[in-house]
Every structure is written in C-alpha cells, then in structure tokens.
Image: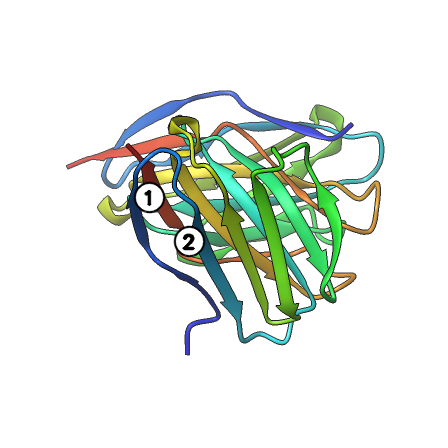
Amino acid sequence: DTAVSQTPKYLVTQMGNDKSIKCEQNLGHDTMYWYKQDSKKFLKIMFSYNNKELIINETVPNRFSPKSPDKAHLNLHINSLELGDSAVYFCASKTQGAETQYFGPGTRLLVL
Amino acid sequence: AQSVTQLDSHVSVSEGTPVLLRCNYSSSYSPSLFWYVQHPNKGLQLLLKYTSAATLVKGINGFEAEFKKSETSFHLTKPSAHMSDAAEYFCVVSDRQDSSYKLIFGSGTRLLVRP
C-alpha cells in the first residue's frame, strides 16, 4: 500500500552507461516531480509533469529524459552516465492545485 | 524569487531537552511553508505545513512551527527531544509563481540527540 514507490532503491553502474529509474504513485495525483539530492544533502527540482505533460525542466542536461506513460508513472532515463550524476533521486507527487507533495523513498545512484 | 535559509547546519541537543531549528524565508507574496524530515537513508516525510491559516502549526511527532511574518521566520520546535528525532530537517517554501508549485528547499539542519 506504498503511496509513492521508486525502483530500484539502489543503483550502481559504470560511467557511460544508460539507466532508468521508475516512479509510481497510487494516490490518484496528477502532478509528479523528480528531485536530485547531492552529496551535501541539497535538494533541487529537476522535472515536473502534469497529466503526462512536461511543465518544469530546470536546466537539466539533455542526457536526462523523463517519460510519463500515464498520470501514475514518471520515469527518468539517464544516458551516458557521469560521475557527477551520483546522487539520490526522489520522486514526488501531488494533486493539481494543491501544494503538499508526497515523496518516494529515493533511488541512490552511484556512478563509478 | 522565493527562498529559505536554514541558519544552522547542525544542532545538537540532549534527550529530553527542547529542540529549535531555525528557518527564515524570503517571498514576494504570502508563502506556503513546510518542514520535511529525512531519517538516515530514508525518504522525505512531511512534518507540518503552513498555508496562511493559523500561524502556529502542529505537526507529527510533537513538532510545531510558528509563522512570524514580521520576522520572516518559520522556526521548528519540540518541547522534548527523543533519540528517534535524530535526522536531517528541511525547511521548504512552495513557489507559487506558476502553477507548478515547485518546492524550494533549504540546505538542511542535521539534528543530533545525545543520550
């Protein structure tokens, strides 16, 4: 009965690889987000989708491509992984018009 | 532009003593403010939120925060710290400039609780 779930929980990969992180929410929300938390715990928004439409793209490199197949899912594909991509990636969701966001458990990505 | 500043990167208290985590905000209009907690290797959990109703907001686990417009502050308090409160705490403002309501996070305060 997890509200916002992410897979995988941990991801260790080599530089240059391509990987995907998946997010699903069962709260009936229509807006979803990806945030990145760096090694100093600083959190910053990357993307937001509303009803499968991209509404925020915070100057994230083109190697990052979000995809929203439906309102309940927001996936993040990363091409040509770099060392600096190592971080914790959080998915969040909310209802359109509301301000409170609910976060997933995070995906810890380590690029070697 | 909206922003929040957490004044302390680390706060250390003894178990059973009060907790005060400080946060100041900057906003060109009436803000919505949140406190989130992150326990080690865990996700982010909402503690409480202020959305222009009562200025004293009560949250989970005995935490509360008071919105003070004159001081542009939203400090988080708890009367008596418990060992399980040890975590990273984030003060957050919601950016209402567009319909996205993206969250803008402070830099975090690590709370250490000594036995």
Q: Chain of mark 2?
A: B
Q: Which color scheme does this rendered protein use? A: rainbow
Closer to the chain start, of discs 1 and 2, is 2
Measuring 35% from the left and 26% from the top, which residue is drawn there? B11
Sort mark 2 into few (<14), some (14-19) or many (20+) by Cα contacts within 10 Å: few
Instruction: Report whether B27 appears left or right of B8.
Output: right
For the C terminus of chain B, the quadrant is: top left
Residue B80 is marked as: 1
Q: Amino acid at mark 2?
A: Gly
- Location of the N terminus of chain B by quadrant is top right
Q: State how far apart marks 1 and 2 are (Cα).
A: 8 Å
As drawn, is B64 to the left or to the right of B110? right
Q: In front here: B96 or A20?
A: A20
Q: Position of residue A60 (x, y in %)?
A: 62, 34
The residue located at (34%, 33%) in the rendering is: B111
Residue B70 image-quadrant placement: top right
Label 1 crowding class (10 Å Cα cut-off): few <14, some 14-19, many 20+? Answer: some
Where residue B74 appears, x then y in whole percent?
A: 61, 35
What chain does badge 1 belong to? B
Say which residue appears at 70% left-offset and 24% top-offset: B71
Q: Quadrant of residue A26?
A: bottom right
Q: What SS does tag 2 mark?
A: helix
Q: Looking at the picture, how far across and down is residue B2, in whole percent?
A: 74, 30
As displayed, is residue A3 above or below residue A49? Answer: below
> In the image, what residue type sits under mark 1?
Ser
Q: Which residue is mark 2?
A: B62
Q: Same chain, marks 1 and 2? A: yes
